[in-house]
Image (cartoon, grey):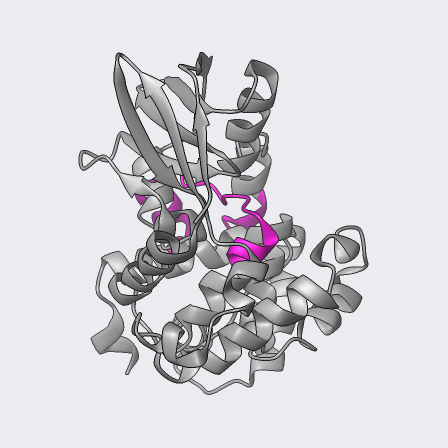
Amino acid sequence: MDRRVYASVIVMGQMRVTTFNLAHTVESAQPLTFFGDERGDGKGMTYTHKNSMIEVVQKGSLLDYRAYGNIKGPELRNEVIMRFGLGDDMARIYKSIATDAFMKKAIDSYSGLRITRNDPWETALCFVISQFNNVKRIRGIVKGLVASYGEEHSFLAGGAQLRFRSFPTPESLAERSTDDLMRHGVGFRARYIKKLARECSESFDLKRIEGEDYSKAKEELMSLDGVGDKVADCILLFGYGRLEAFPTDTWIKRIVEHVYFKGRKRSIREIHEFAEERWGGYAGYAQQYLFHNARINKLGKVLR
């Protein structure tokens, strides 16, 4: 594996933030959670971005950030703002999605939870792995793939050499056998991961759908092997910042049926139509607050 070695390059900055809670954001099962490392107290985390390692620490209304590697100050600031959705107008979003008592309680409980914006390839891989899986296992699998197939980078800081691995590229996974991938606990997903990596490295340009109409972009994503309705919406929401996306799996379907339809069954299509009509362009935020509130408060038993 190639190794990139950098001299002592540390870029630091600070910004004031409002209506932002790092702990709620990273604990809400977003792609960043799967390959980044939370500090433990909910106030800081470290993650990789291309060939740099970035650390953010929240101190009340101040967000400190620093990077090691090959990134300049303005680029770093823009990366942090984009990554944590700090440009989103939360007052407007809350006004738009606070349509009922359940949602208002979720917002009050987890105020400051933001939708993160991640690299589309990272997002696609994470959510293909997420199918029929839980957060702990997803994180273990993704971390294992990074450790085995990510490019190693080193930097010198304080007289010590520190190392990290960047997120594996589509090319690095496409050349692996399904047996290699299976060793990381991906199970039946191995063939989907390999096919996805091959398509994204050879024939499918993820950048191409950036500005496409939502329905068209979703249709194109669903042409990828292993990407269904829910995963496509996850990629659009967390990889492209399409806040109108409303990822709907069995879990979200049950939450919506329980809260808004008195337990009556609804099809996935009906759930999408309901979310679009009720929350419009911010349906993705509504979904994340519904999901996080139900998950933290262990509503699974109620929703079975």
Residue at horizontal 50 percent and vertical 45 percent from the top: 115
Above or below, 266 against 126 in this view is: below
Residue placed farthest to the left in the image? 41
- In this picture, is 158 found above or below 135? above
Is 55 in the magenta? no
Q: Residue at x 66, y 62 (%)?
A: 201
Q: How many marks?
A: 0
Position of residue 1 measured from the top left corner of the image (x, y, whole percent): 43, 49
Q: Position of residue 151 (x, y in %)?
A: 45, 46
Q: Which residues are magenta?
A: 96-123
Residue placed furthest toward the front: 2
Residue 31 sits above or below residue 196 on the image? above
| Residue 244 visible in the snapshot | yes
Tell me residue 125's x, y (percent).
50, 63
Q: Nearer the viewer, residue 196 or 32?
A: 196
Q: In the image, is residue 122 part of the stretch drawn in magenta?
A: yes
Q: Is residue 164 above or below residue 289?
A: above
Evaluate whether residue 274 shows in this view.
no
In the rendered image, residue 253, in percent from the top left (x then y), is placed at: 45, 76
In which quarter of the view is residue 64 placed?
top left
Instruction: Please state which of residues 185 and 29 is positioned toward the viewer in this rendering.
Output: 185
* x 33%, y 74%: residue: 133
Asked if residue 43 lies left or right of residue 220, the reply is: left
